[in-house]
Image (cartoon, rainbow, N blue to C red):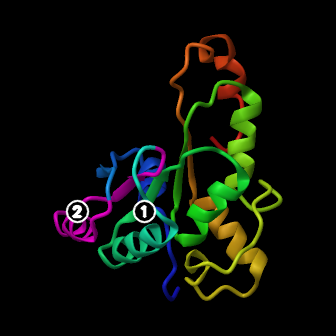
């Protein structure tokens, strides 16, 4: 279908293949373009530690799309409004930092997907410009299938809660 955005990392995972990419902690459309030229599958932007503005993410996603890369990002926090800003720009994979409990893992999963699989609100950012869908719900289902949601487990508290975290659907 026309301009249908799919997540190359999700596609490769389904086939049991390795996906390759790079992480950027600073804005560089040149490096994003070159990552696509060398055949990477994705590029990830460190929005937790990097100085990215929403306009930067817009431009970086645009270049990633043109270079054939799936754009992903680590977000600074898992607040709905923060994650929404990244997804509305065109990010297709979210890494949520400091996931320490099943409740936080569920918040992360819910913020990244539309109903019925999450609680993301529908916006009109550039991320929703792609594809010729017969309806809004068809677009939402396609997006839900293509977003990659990753919980970053980096705190000692995780050890007490790992079973609950791993049980959360959509991570």
Residue in view at x 34 percent, y 75 percent: 63
Q: Position of residue 82 (x, y in %)?
A: 64, 55
Residue 129 within the segment the image draws in magenta: no
- Give me the residue at 51% from left, 24% from top: 154
The segment highlighted magenta reads: 27-48
Q: Residue furthest top?
A: 160
Does 20 sit left or right of 98 as displayed?
Answer: left
Determine whether, in the image, residue 96 is placed left or right of residue 18. right
The answer to whether 153 is drawn above or below residue 26 in the figure is: above
- Give percent across and percent down for residue 64: 35, 70
Who is closer to the viewer here, 80 or 1? Answer: 80
Q: Quadrant of residue 65?
A: bottom left
Compared with 138, 157 (above or below) is above
Q: Secondary structure at mark 2?
A: helix
Q: Report which residue position mark 2 lands on.
A: 35
**Label 1 secondary element:** strand
Q: Which residue is mark 1?
A: 71
Q: Earlier in the sequence, mark 2 or mark 1?
A: 2
At 48% from the left and 45% from the top, the residue drawn is 48
Is 7 displayed left or right of 137 in the figure? left
Q: Residue furthest right?
A: 116
- Number of residues whose C-alpha sits closer than 10 Å to that of mark 1, classed few (under 14), some (14–19) or many (20 or more): many
Residue 15, position as x, y percentages in the image: 43, 50
In the depicted view, which residue is nearer to us: 153 or 166? 153
The answer to whether residue 2 is above or below residue 26 is below
Residue shown at the point (73%, 76%) measured from the top left: 138
- The quarter holding residue 140 reads bottom right
């Amino acid at each position: 279908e026309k301009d249908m955005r799919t997540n190359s990392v999700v596609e490769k995972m389904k086939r049991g293949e390795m996906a390759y990419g790079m992480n950027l902690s600073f804005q560089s459309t040149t490096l994003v373009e070159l990552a696509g030229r060398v055949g990477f599958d994705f590029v990830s932007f460190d929005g937790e530690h990097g100085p990215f503005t929403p306009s930067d993410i817009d431009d970086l996603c645009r270049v990633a799309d043109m270079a054939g890369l799936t754009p992903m990002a680590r977000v600074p926090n898992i607040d709905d409004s923060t994650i929404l800003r990244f997804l509305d720009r065109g990010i297709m994979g979210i890494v949520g930092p400091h996931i320490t409990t099943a409740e936080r893992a569920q918040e992360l999963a819910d913020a990244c997907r539309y109903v019925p699989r999450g609680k993301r609100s529908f916006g009109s950012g550039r991320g929703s410009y792609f594809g010729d869908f017969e309806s809004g719900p068809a677009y939402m289902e396609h997006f839900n299938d293509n977003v990659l949601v990753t919980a970053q487990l980096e705190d000692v508290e995780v050890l007490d809660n790992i079973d609950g975290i791993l049980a959360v659907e959509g991570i």
